[in-house]
Image (cartoon, rainbow, N blue to C red):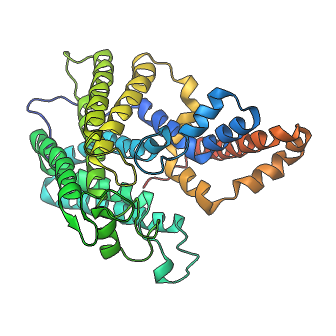
């Protein structure tokens, strides 16, 4: 006898809301565009700037370096854009799985899956930090980029699965305003309140107090525990975007959705710039103004990719980005110490590179590294090998 199941909508679904659990091609491409710069694109840009000294490459090279403290460059948005995209995917992935859930038992299984994913990302982040080169507990860095993605995604997922849209918005506002209030009003021993320096901020103090092992900057870790709170807001901003894109209504055709994303992004840029006057945009501290400002840019980039790829249907130009996006965690791990792409590139292309004029050899070496990485990704794609975390 075949069992019957009741299809339940996600807690956050709007009454009478119709949804399409389809995969957005633009998300894979944008994720790949984001990852391209840290897997090797920045190396090409820096080499071109040094070799040609052309203003456009000098500008691009500077944009592909982190701001030392307060301020913003394009490179500062690589990490939060990836987390934002993870949030956008959530209504398509968790929402679809929850719709198939059969009562509380299946929901508990979903929670267990989320916990496993988070713990795996924390572990992989420690591997990237050099866990297997064990040099003692005190020299081990536990915080990481992947760890923050895992934690922020997990808590945003809990909020998404257990609250309605109004509750999600309240959480988003509460996290950002609460973090702002804590960072500016709570006094730090030896420094006082509102000291947003590397050592004197509340986030740095709590990291020194609570985070085990070593901190990335000695007295502060940009992927620390306290600054993970507003990072949940970055993921939630992606959740709102994913809900909007998944919503199926004649009032919101795809073109209008793309335009709305761009408008919303512009509004957030303005709000983030205004907040910057009293709470500086700072990636290391993941300030609330940083969340809003980078969220604006993330929406604008997604709007462009969405309108071109999903709406207009022009996909071929983004194939290489899609290759990267479909195996983004794989290439991140591989390019951060698991594979020596420089040696591989020299093995295959070293003879050709040495034939180039000496000033250009660095450019072709950086390009060869990316070519080898893309070849690996294409091999994985052709064989349908994808690392799902």
In the displayed structure image, the side of residue 97 where residue 42 appears, left or right: right
Residue displayed at 47% across by 64% down: 124
- Farthest residue toward the bottom? 136
| Front in this rendered view, residue 175 or 73 | 73
**Quarter holding residue 291:** top left
Q: Work out whether residue 227 can be spotted.
A: yes
Q: Residue 273, how many percent across, how many down? A: 30, 34
| Front in this rendered view, residue 45 or 71 | 71
149 up-or-down from 312: above or below: below
Q: Work out whether residue 101 can be spotted.
A: no
In the displayed structure image, the side of residue 284 where residue 174 appears, left or right: left
388 up-or-down from 312: above or below: below
Q: How many marks?
A: 0
Q: Residue 389, how many percent across, how many down? A: 42, 55
Q: Residue 99, how many percent across, how many down? A: 20, 43
In the displayed structure image, the side of residue 285 where residue 65 appears, left or right: right
74 up-or-down from 68: above or below: above
Residue displayed at 30% across by 40% down: 276
In the displayed structure image, the side of residue 343 where residue 265 appears, left or right: left
**Quarter holding residue 19:** top left
254 up-or-down from 187: above or below: above
| Front in this rendered view, residue 12 or 358 | 358
Q: Residue 343, how many percent across, how many down? A: 77, 56
Residue displayed at 65% across by 42% down: 374
């Amino acid at each position: 006898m075949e069992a019957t199941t009741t299809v339940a909508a996600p807690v956050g679904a709007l009454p009478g809301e119709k949804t399409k659990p389809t995969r957005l091609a633009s998300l894979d491409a944008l994720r790949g565009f984001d990852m391209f710069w840290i897997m090797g694109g920045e190396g090409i840009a820096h080499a071109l700037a040094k070799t040609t000294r052309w203003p456009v490459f000098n500008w691009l090279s500077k944009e592909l370096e982190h701001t030392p403290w307060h301020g913003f460059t394009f490179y500062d948005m690589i990490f939060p854009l990836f987390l934002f995209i993870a949030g956008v995917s959530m209504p398509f992935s968790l929402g679809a799985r929850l719709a198939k859930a059969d009562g509380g038992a299946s929901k508990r299984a979903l929670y267990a899956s989320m916990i496993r994913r988070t713990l795996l990302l924390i572990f992989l982040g420690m591997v990237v930090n050099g866990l297997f080169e064990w040099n003692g507990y005190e020299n081990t860095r536990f915080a990481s980029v992947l760890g923050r993605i895992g934690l922020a995604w997990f808590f945003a997922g809990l909020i998404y699965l257990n609250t309605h849209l109004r509750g999600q918005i309240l959480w988003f506002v509460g996290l950002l305003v609460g973090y702002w209030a804590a960072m500016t009003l709570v006094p730090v021993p030896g420094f006082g309140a509102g000291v947003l320096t590397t050592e004197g901020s509340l986030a740095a103090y709590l990291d020194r107090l609570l985070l085990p092992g070593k901190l990335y900057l000695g007295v502060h870790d940009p992927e620390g525990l306290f600054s993970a709170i507003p990072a949940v807001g970055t993921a939630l901003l992606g959740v709102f975007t994913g809900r909007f894109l998944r919503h199926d209504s004649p009032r919101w055709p795809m073109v209008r959705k793309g335009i709305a994303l761009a408008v919303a992004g512009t509004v957030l840029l303005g709000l983030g710039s205004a907040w910057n006057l009293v709470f500086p945009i700072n990636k290391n501290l993941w300030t609330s103004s940083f969340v809003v400002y980078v969220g604006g840019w993330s929406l604008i980039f997604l709007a462009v990719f969405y309108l071109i790829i999903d709406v207009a249907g022009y996909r071929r130009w983004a194939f290489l980005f899609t290759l990267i996006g479909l195996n983004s965690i794989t290439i991140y791990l591989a390019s951060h110490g698991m594979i020596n792409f420089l040696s591989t590139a020299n093995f295959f292309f070293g003879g050709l590179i040495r034939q180039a004029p000496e000033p250009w050899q660095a450019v072709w070496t950086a390009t060869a590294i990316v070519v080898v990485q893309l070849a690996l990704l294409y091999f994985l794609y052709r064989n349908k090998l994808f690392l799902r975390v």
